[in-house]
């Protein structure tokens, strides 16, 4: 197989790997350069775009793989962990949002654990509809929080209902995360049952 075919057949995985690298850069920025909120916002946006792009490329070119699904979930977990660190460490995050984030962190730890066990047992670890819905809502919330901080730093008014909407998004994400965990348990049980 030549290099062009090798790259093409792994294009979605390469996009996901780029997202993983960007997520680690984002972690670095959130821990050591929290005041560079525009950079954090752009990195969040870039990671989310890799999440969107890898799936589109994989489906369009029919290059879907279990490795790709595992890498995709890994990128999502690194990204979410990074943003949870940001939420916990940054005093500019509204206390109501922090209240909604803490139980979501516990659910994410459970989802990470079940993902790891699935990968270890070579099971299908791809996200289901509940996990995708959770990730969608969490992503909106994660992207909105640095945007709100930037708006406040630039002297723009941010209505309190925006915080309330994000609070509801995070609570819905929590519910979707719990459902995702339950569905993964069912999926793994079905995969492990002898035929």
Image: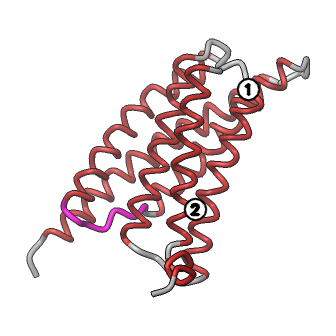
The residue positioned farthest toward the bottom in the image shown: 1
Residue reaching furthest to the front: 2
Most common SS among magenta residues: loop
> Magenta part of the protein: which range?
121-127
**Is tag 2's residue or tag 1's residue first in the polypeptide sequence?**
2
Q: Position of residue 12 (x, y in %)?
A: 54, 69
**Where is mark 1, residue-wise?**
37
Q: Is residue 94 above or below residue 65?
A: above
Residue 21 x, y percent position in the rendering: 54, 46
Where is residue 102 drawn, in percent x and y? 45, 25
* Mark 1 crowd level (few <14, some 14–19, many ≥20, 10 Å Cα): some
**Residue 144 image label:** none
Give the secondary structure at mark 1.
Answer: helix
Q: Residue at x 31, y 52 (%)?
A: 115
Q: Residue at x 73, y 40 (%)?
A: 42
Left or right relative to 105: residue 90: right
Residue at x-position 72% and y-position 35%: 41
Identity of the residue drawn at 50% across and 73% down: 10
Q: Residue farthest to the top?
A: 91
**Quadrant where the image shows the C terminus:** bottom left
**Residue topped by disc 2:** 15
């Amino acid at each position: 197989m030549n290099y062009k075919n090798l790259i093409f057949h792994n294009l979605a995985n390469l996009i996901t790997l780029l997202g993983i690298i960007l997520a680690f850069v984002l972690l670095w920025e959130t821990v050591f350069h929290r005041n560079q909120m525009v950079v954090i916002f752009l990195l969040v946006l870039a990671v989310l775009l890799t999440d969107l792009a890898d799936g589109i490329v994989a489906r369009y070119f029919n290059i879907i793989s279990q490795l790709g699904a595992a890498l995709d979930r890994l990128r999502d977990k690194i990204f979410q962990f990074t943003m949870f660190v940001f939420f916990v460490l940054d005093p500019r995050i509204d206390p109501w949002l922090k209240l909604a984030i803490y139980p979501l962190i516990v659910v994410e730890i459970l989802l990470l654990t079940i993902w790891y066990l699935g990968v270890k047992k070579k099971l299908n670890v791809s996200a289901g509809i509940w996990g995708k819905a959770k990730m969608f809502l969490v992503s909106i919330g994660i992207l909105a929080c640095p945007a709100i901080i930037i708006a406040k730093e630039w002297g723009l008014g941010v209505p309190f209902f925006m915080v309330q909407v994000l609070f509801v998004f995070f609570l819905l994400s929590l519910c979707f995360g719990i459902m995702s965990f339950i569905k993964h348990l069912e999926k793994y049980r079905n995969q492990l049952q002898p035929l």
